[in-house]
Image (tube, rainbow, N blue to C red):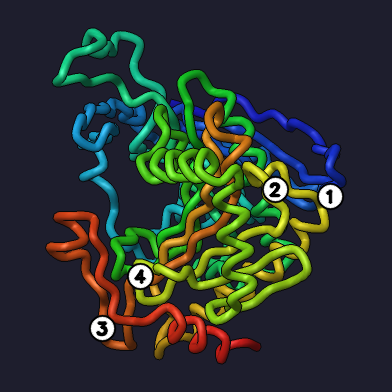
């Protein structure tokens, strides 16, 4: 199957004073979308995907889990993924004549494409769910999974990007959030990165992922319930008060700028865990103004750099942008980043064992104040 269309959406000159971003959308050989985000107008982005690919497999299923009042995603086709390819076989590097990858261009800045092995994707038209009210409820996993590639440099990492690249990446995440939020059935968009073989990453090339869920995730659902209960009790916003309390206490603050504060939460669950909040509460990335975005690029690079210097080798981590659901709780939720590592020391990992996996009850042997003190020492 050959490639079809390549269309240039043109400059996105923004109402919030963002710099111009050039966005080009093409189709890969199996019909998936790939979008280039560029800072320069004159990049050649019309390269065609010359691979022979079978149609992408997308039959995922959701099953209702009534005790947690949530959904579990089943995507059995994901078993076929390639594990830890070398640079010569990397599907996220730019294409060359000898090695055709997921990204047909010979070079790129930021590229986003639909995951070939998606946890979530548009269901086949014939897919149906169970009638409402069934205890053993299931439905097709409508939604979308995308891969966000940060750079064409296979050996780089988020912490090594330039501030300009981090800003472009942010533009891409904002655009994806807006596009995916508008898809039918999508309830929440989560932009995240898993880094390091220790936590199950299958691709070393610097990249993140986006899940557009057809339900509000358990974590967000529970946080919104707590924030609503807090409001009923006090008439105040839980996120505002928590950020104010951490800033006033100060013992767990890792770094702060005029508009952002990064702190280890008072009840951190992981050995090293940092939450980053803008001082002005907003529901999502798109709501940040241009000054907040500029400062964010600097403060993100600062904290990711500290994680890279924590141990003998860069710490494996999970980083995720918590954004308000598409339709629910937007007036109460606060956008923030959560970054954590399961590494306790250079040679010890924390595993999710009985208490955590069995009961969701975390035990942590690094005190949050000690973790914050250590992260403060790692300033550049
Ligand atoms: Zn690569």
Residue at mark 4 to residue at mark 3: CA–CA distance? 13 Å
Judged by depth in the image, the label closer to the viewer, 3 or 1, is 3
Using the image, tell me which numbered label, if any, was put on residue 103.
none
Considering the numbered disc 3 on the image, is that residue within a helix, a strand or a loop? strand
Judged by depth in the image, the label closer to the viewer, 2 or 4, is 4
Q: Which of 91 and 228 is in front in this view?
A: 228
Upstream in sequence: badge 2 or badge 4: 2
Residue at mark 3 to residue at mark 1: CA–CA distance? 43 Å
- How many numbered marks appear? 4
Upstream in sequence: badge 1 or badge 4: 1
Q: Do the residues labelled 2 and 1 touch (CB within 8 Å)?
A: yes
Using the image, tell me which numbered label, if any, was put on residue 19.
1
Residue 53 visible, this angle: yes
Q: Do the residues labelled 2 and 4 touch (CB within 8 Å)?
A: no
- Quadrant in the picture for residue 158: bottom right
Whether residue 260 sits left or right of residue 18 in the image: it is left
Q: Nearer the viewer, residue 221 or 31?
A: 221
Considering the numbered disc 4 on the image, is that residue within a helix, a strand or a loop? loop
Give the residue number, with chain letter if any, for mark 2: 171
Residue 50 visible, this angle: no
Whether residue 11 sits left or right of residue 214 in the image: it is right
- Quadrant in the picture for residue 174: top right
Q: In this view, does 210 lie above or below 292?
A: above
Q: Is residue 342 above or below residue 279?
A: below
Residue at mark 2 to residue at mark 1: CA–CA distance? 9 Å
Upstream in sequence: badge 2 or badge 1: 1
Residue at mark 1 to residue at mark 4: CA–CA distance? 36 Å
Considering the numbered disc 1 on the image, is that residue within a helix, a strand or a loop? loop
Q: Residue 242: x, y in percent?
A: 56, 60
Q: Residue 271: x, y in percent?
A: 36, 76
Q: Does the residue labelled 3 lie within 8 Å of ligand 1?
A: no
Residue at mark 2 to residue at mark 3: CA–CA distance? 36 Å
């Amino acid at each position: 199957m050959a490639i079809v269309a390549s269309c240039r959406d043109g400059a996105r000159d923004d109402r919030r004073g963002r710099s111009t971003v050039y966005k080009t959308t093409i189709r890969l050989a199996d019909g998936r979308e790939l979008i280039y985000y560029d800072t320069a107008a004159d990049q050649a982005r019309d390269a065609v995907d010359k691979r022979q690919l079978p149609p992408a497999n997308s039959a995922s299923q959701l099953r209702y889990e009534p005790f947690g009042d949530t959904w579990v995603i089943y995507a059995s086709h994901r078993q076929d993924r390639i594990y830890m390819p070398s640079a010569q076989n990397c599907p996220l590097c730019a294409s060359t004549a000898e090695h055709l990858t997921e990204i047909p261009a010979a070079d790129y800045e930021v590229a986003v494409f639909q995951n070939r092995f998606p946890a979530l994707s548009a269901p086949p038209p014939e897919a149906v769910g169970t009638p409402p009210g069934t205890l053993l409820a299931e439905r097709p996993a409508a939604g979308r999974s995308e891969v966000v590639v940060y750079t064409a440099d296979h050996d780089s990492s988020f912490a090594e990007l330039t501030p300009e690249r981090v800003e472009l990446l942010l533009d891409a995440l904002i655009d994806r959030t807006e596009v995916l939020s508008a898809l039918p059935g999508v309830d929440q968009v989560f932009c995240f990165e898993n880094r390091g073989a220790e936590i199950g990453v299958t691709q070393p090339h610097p990249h993140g992922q986006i899940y557009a869920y057809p339900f509000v995730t358990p974590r967000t659902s529970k946080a919104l319930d707590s924030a609503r209960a807090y409001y009923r009790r006090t008439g105040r916003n839980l996120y505002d008060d928590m950020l104010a309390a951490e800033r006033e206490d100060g013992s767990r603050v890792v770094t702060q700028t005029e508009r952002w504060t990064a702190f280890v939460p008072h009840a951190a669950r992981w050995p090293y865990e940092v939450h980053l909040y803008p001082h002005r509460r907003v529901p999502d990335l798109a709501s940040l103004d241009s000054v907040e975005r500029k400062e964010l690029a600097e403060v993100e690079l600062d904290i990711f750099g500290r994680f890279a210097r924590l141990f003998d080798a860069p710490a494996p981590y999970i980083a995720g942008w918590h954004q308000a659901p598409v339709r629910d709780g937007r007036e109460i939720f606060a956008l923030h980043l959560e970054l954590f590592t399961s590494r306790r020391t250079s040679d010890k990992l924390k595993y999710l064992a009985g208490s955590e996996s069995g009961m969701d009850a975390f035990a942590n042997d690094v005190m949050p104040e000690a973790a914050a003190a250590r992260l403060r020492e790692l300033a550049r």
